[in-house]
Image (tube, rainbow, N blue to C red):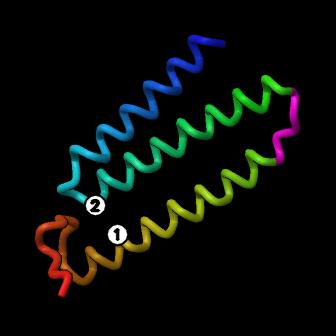
Amino acid sequence: MMMNLLIVLIMYLAGNMIFVSKHKHLLIVLLSLEFIVLSIFFFLMMYLMMIDNNMYMLMVFLVFSVCEGVLGLSILVSMIRTHGNDYFYSYNLI
């Protein structure tokens, strides 16, 4: 059990490190956010199995994470259609 918790913690920290360091492309940022959500899902699954609770909360979490992923993908597609790429430095915020 402790080994699984360590793996989830390493996954979470790796996702955060990628999110902080690779901020040039929007696609890489979105993928790192999905990796963080995946590590939180594994942690919730282990926690709910440990306390012998039902897995209904995992389904709610998955629904919200899918909605978050679809929203990020739609923003990416609209930015690529309007600007032609996914570089952050090419966007004018004015």
The residue under the point 36% across, 32% down is 14
Q: Position of residue 87 (x, y in %)?
A: 17, 65
Q: Which of the 4 quarters of the picture holds residue 58?
A: top right
Per the image, is 70 magenta? no
Q: Secondary structure at mark 2?
A: helix
Question: Looking at the picture, which amino acid does disc 1 mark?
Answer: Leu
Residue 26's disc number: 2
Q: Secondary structure at mark 1?
A: helix
Look at the picture and state if 4 lies above or below 29. Answer: above
Q: Main secondary structure of the magenta part?
A: loop
Look at the picture and state if 3 lies above or below 8. Answer: above
Q: Position of residue 5 (x, y in %)?
A: 58, 20
Q: Is residue 57 left or right of residue 63?
A: right
**In the foreground, 42 or 51:** 51
The residue under the point 87% across, 34% down is 53
The residue under the point 74% across, 55% down is 60
Q: Position of residue 81 (x, y in %)?
A: 27, 80
**In the foreground, 78 or 58:** 58
Q: Which of the 4 quarters of the picture holds residue 1?
A: top right
Q: Is residue 29 left or right of residue 39?
A: left
Magenta-tinted stretch: 52-56
The alpha-carbon separation of the residues under discs 2 and 1 comes to 7 Å
User: Mark 2 vs mark 1: which is more N-terminal?
Assistant: 2
Is the Cβ of the residue at disc 2 closer than 8 Å to that at disc 1? Answer: yes
Furthest-bottom residue in this view? 94
Neighbours of disc 2 within 10 Å: few (<14), some (14-19), many (20+): many
Q: Which of the 4 quarters of the picture holds residue 10?
A: top left
Look at the picture and state if 19 lies above or below 73. Answer: above
Q: Which residue is mark 1?
A: 76
